[in-house]
Amino acid sequence: MRRKMLLWALFCLVLALLPSQTASVAVMSVDLGSEWMKVAIVKPGVPMEIALNKESRRKTPIAVCLKENERLFGDSALGVSVKNPKFVYRHLQSLLGKKHDNPQVAVYQKRFPEHHLGKDESRGTVLFRNSEEMQYSPEELLGMVLNYSRGLAQDFAEQPIKDAVITVPAFFNQAERRAVLQAAQMAGVKVLQLINDNTAVALNYGVFRRKDINSTAQNMMFYDMGSDSTTATIVTYQTVKTKESGTQPQLQIRGVGFDRSLGGFEMELRLRDHLAKLFNEQKKTKKDVRENHRAMAKLLKEAQRLKTVLSANAEFMAQVEGLLDEIDFKAKVTRVEFEALCADLFERVPGPVQEALSSAEMSLDEIEQVILVGGSTRVPKVQEVLLKAVGKEELGKNINADEAAAMGAVYQAAALSKAFKVKPFLVREAAVFPIQVEFTRETEDEDGSRSLKHNKRILFQRMAPYPQRKVITFNRYTDDFAFDINYGDLTFLGQNDLSVFGSLNLTTVQLSGVSSSFQKHMDAESKGIKAHFNMDESGMLLLDRVESVFETIMEEKDEESTLTKLGNTISSLFGGGSSESNANVTEPVQDEEEVHPETGKEQGQKEEAAPQEEKLEPGEKQEEEVPTQEKTEGEALDSKADPQDEKEGEKNGKEEAAGEAAGEAAGEAAKEPQKKAKPQKKTKFSEDVTVELQVNDILNPSLEAIASSNKKLQDLTDRDLEKQEREKTLNSLEAFIFETQDKMYQEEYQAVVSEEEKEAITTKLSEASAWMDEDGYSAVTKELREKLQELKKLCKAMFFRVEERRKWPDRLAALESMLNHSSFFLRSAKLIPEDDQIFTEVELKTLDKVINETTTWKNDTVAEQEKRSPTERPVLLSKDIESKLSLLDREVNYLLNKAKFAKPRAKPKAKNNSTTSESNSKANSSKTEEKVIPPKEEETKDKEATEEVRPGEEPPTIEPTGQNTDSSSQSQPKDETASTESAEKDQSENHVGDEL
C-alpha cells in the first residue's frame, strides 16, 4: 500500500513540474474607437471582464506622446497635449488606409494644425514628420497603441496574451482593414478576427438574451454615434438548425447605414471654436487665441467637458486658467447655444437610419426596437431627433453604450480560441460594399469583325453574408489573360463619403500558364478557368487559387470477368470504394458558390442584373448532374448534402452491378448499356495557374519597411522597459536609504548593533544620500543597482538579527506546546492495556526519543543564546526551531493516523452488546451454524472476500493499515463472522473520517 502511495505522490510531483497548459490561454478584445479604446479579457475563472488601465479606468484614450526620450499613452499622453500638442497623436483611425491626397487627410490637418503631415513616397500614404529622425506612419502609431492595450490586458490577467479580436467600423474598406492588421502585426498581436463594431454590439446584446430568441425573426436596430462617425445597423435574431450543434441562436446583419463625419468630436470642435470666439471678443489681449496651438488645446479640453455637462444641464460656466498670456478665461454657455452651433449636424442624425432600412429593404414598422450605442448618443438633441425619425415610443437604453462592443468581441474571441468552450451563437456578417470582377475579351460581331468587350460580374453583392467562398469560371479563354477586382456600384454613398473612400480599384490579377495547360491536355475537354475567392471572417477578400479544370472519359476494361465484376460490386457495397486514382481530382470546397461570368451562347450575354448574372448556364448544369468525381468541383455544394449523395451513389452502384451481373449471366453483349455507363466514368482534374497580384488601392509595405517598423517599435519598447527598470531601481534605493536611516533610531535595531557597526552603517547611508542628491538622479540603472546592493550587504547582518529576535517568541511557544501535547499523547499510549495495544514498542520508543532530544536541544540552545550578546550572530535560529517542530509533528501524526485506522481487538460479547437487535439475531444464527458445522479456514477466507465488498457498497479506496487488519482477521476468524456488519461499519466510518 505504501508503494502505491509513493507512486501516486511521485506522479503528482511530475504533474506539478510539467509546464502549465493554462499559462497563456487567456484571450483579449480591443474595441478600437477613434477617441477611446476598451480592452476586455477572458481567462480561466474570469469570464468576460473589462481590463482596467493603470489609472483604474475602464476606458483609455487613444493617444500617443512621443518626445525625444519619452513615450506616454492614454491619460498621461493627453496631459502632455495641453502643454505640447505637437508631440501627441490622436484620432489615428481616420488616417488608416488613406493616401496623402485624400480629403480626409486635409480635414485632419485642419483639426490638428500642430502636426506636419508628410508623404510616404514609396506607398503614397501619410507620415507624421516632426523631424528627420522622428517619422511615424499611422499604422506604426496604432501598433504602439495595440501593444499598450496588450500590456494592459496582460497586467490585468496576470499572464501573457497574444490572441485578440479587434473591432473596426463596419464601413472600413479593404485598405483600412489591411492597415489595422499590419498595425497588429507590428504590435505582436495575433488577430483571431476583425469584427465590425456594430456586429460585436449585436452579439453582446444577443448573448445575454439567448432565452428570448426563438424561431420567429426579431429585427433590432442599433444606432451607434461615436466620436468621429455614426452607424445604424439592422440585425435579425432567430434560431436556426445546424448539423453540428442542433438548434442555436443566430444574428444576421441585414442592413447598415453610416455617416463617416457625424460624431461627437465635431461637436466638441465647434464648441472649442465658439469659446475661442468668446475669448477674442473679451479683448483682454491683442493676440488671436486661434493662432496659439497650446491655447486651442486647452479650449478643446474644456469643450469636451462642456459637452458632457450640457447633456445634463441647461447652462454651464466654462473657465480656463491662464489661457493666453496668463489671462484667465470664463464664459457662460447654454444648451440652446450648443444646439444652434450643431444644428446642421443634428439634421443628419436620421440619415444612417434611412440608409440602413434601404439596404435591408425593410420599413420602420418591421423594427421592434431602436437601441442606443456610443457615447455621443447621450446628447439630448440627438435622442430627440432620432426618436422623432424612427417614430417609436422610446429609444432602447438597455445596453452598456460604452462597453457593449468590447464585451461582444471578447465573447467571439473565446469562441474562436481552442482553450474555451462557449455556447454557440452563430454570426452572419454582411459586406457593406459590393465587389465585382471586370475583364475584357475579344468577341466576333455579326459582320465577322472582332472587337474587345468589357465585362463586369458581381462577386459579392451589397450586404452579402460572409465568411463565404465563391468561384468564378472563365470559359472563353485559352491563353494567358488578366482580370481586375474592383468595388461595385457605390452610388448609395453620399458625396462626402465617396470622396474619402479611396481607390475603387482593388487588384489586377495576371494569370500565366493557361495556354501551356491547354497544350498539355489537348485530348481533354476544358471546363474553364476557375478562380476561387474567399471573404474571411475579418471581411478581407482573398484569392485562394486559380486553376484550369479539364474533364476526360476513362476507358472501360472489356476483359473484366463476371467474377471480377461481382467482386468489385460486393466490395463497393461494403464501402470498398473506387479503384480509380483521385490524384488530380480537385478537392471539394465547402460552401462555395459559383459565379459564371459568361453564358453558353453569345446572344445570352447580359450585364444588367446581378441575380441574372449568377445563374448557372446549361452546360454547367450538365456538369453538376454527372455523379461521383464531378461532385468534387464543390461549386454551390454544401457538405451537409454529402451523406445523401453517397447513398444515391451507392444505390446507383448497386443497380449498375446488378445489371452487369444479369447481362453476363444471360450472355448478352449489347453495346447500348455500355454507352449509358460511359458518362459515369467521366473524371475532372485540374492544374494550378500561376497568379501575379498587383495591388491598386494602397500598396502593402515592403519587407524592408516592415522590418524597419518592427525594429523602430521594438527599440521604443526596450527604451520604455529600461526607463521603467531605472525608475524602479531609483525608487528602491531612495526608499532603502530613508527607511534604514529611520530604523537606526528604533529601539529594536539599536539593541542588536554595536557602536562601531552603527557608525559604519550611518556613514554609508549619509554618503549614499548625498550621492543621490548630486549624481543619483542622472545615474544609469547599473550604477543605481550596485549602490543598492552595497547598502543591503552592509545592513544584512543587522536585519538578520532583528528578524530572528522577532520570530523567537512565536516559534518557541509553538515548540513548547508541541512538546506538551506529544508528551501527553505518549503517556496516554503507554497506558493502553497490552491486549488492546495498537502501537509497537519501537514506535513508542522512537517518539520518546524525539521528545527527549527536542527538549534537550531547546533548553541547551536557549541557555546558550542567553549568554550571547545581542550584537553577535544568534545560535537560536528560527529555521532550526521549525525543523524540530516538523520532526515532532511527523512522528505524532504517524501514530495518530495509525490509531485512526486501527481495528480494535474487541470481544464478541462486546460487539453484540453494541449492535442492534437485528445484528444480535444475525450473530446468534452464525454462532449456531459454527457449533453444528465448524467452518473451514478456506471457507472463512472466501466469506471474508465475499463480504469485504458487497454489491451496492463502495469498497475503501485507501487502506493505510491493511497489514494490521489482515493480522487481526486471521487471528480471530470466528469473531469476524459474527461481527461482519459492525466491523464494516467501523471501517467505513474510519475511512470517511480519514477523507474528511
Image (spheres, rainbow, N blue to C red):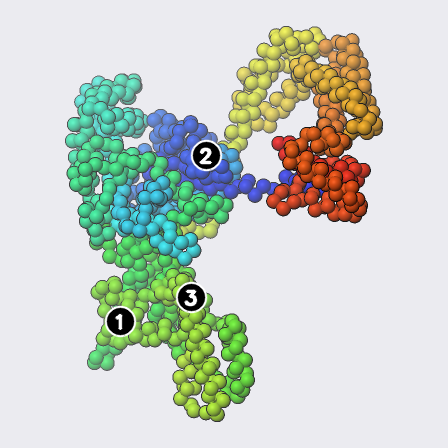
Q: Which one is earlier in the sequence, the residue at label 2 or at label 1?
A: 2
- Which one is closest to the eye, mark 1 or mark 3? 3
Name the residue nearer the viewer: 663 or 933: 933
Label ID, residue 317: none
Question: What residue appears at the point 32 percent right and 65 percent down from the top-left corner?
Answer: 595
Residue 248, how many percent across, how many down? 37, 50
**Amino acid on which the number 1 mark rests in the picture:** Leu
How far is disc 2 from disc 1 in space, using C-alphas?
58 Å
Side of 270 where 662 appears, left or right: right
> Badge 1 is on which residue?
452
Secondary element under disc 3, as helix, strand or loop, is helix
* Residue 797 seen in this snapshot: no
For disc 2, the neighbor class at 10 Å (few under 14, some 14 to 19, many from 20) is: some
The answer to the question of whether label 1 and label 3 lie on touching residues, with beta carbons closer than 8 A, is no
Q: Specify the quadrant that holds the N terminus.
A: top right
Side of 580 where 55 appears, left or right: left
Residue 684, how many percent across, how many down? 43, 74
Question: What residue appears at the point 78 percent right and 11 percent down from the top-left corner?
Answer: 863
Image quarter of residue 962: top right
Question: What residue appears at the point 31 percent right and 51 percent down from the top-left corner?
Answer: 215
Please tell me whether residue 494 is drawn above or below residue 872 in the rendered image: below
For disc 1, the neighbor class at 10 Å (few under 14, some 14 to 19, many from 20) is: few
> Badge 2 is on which residue?
152
Question: What residue appears at the point 16 percent right and 35 percent down from the top-left corner?
Answer: 343
> Badge 3 is on which residue?
642
**Amino acid on which the number 3 mark rests in the picture:** Asp
- Which one is closest to the eye, mark 3 or mark 2? 3
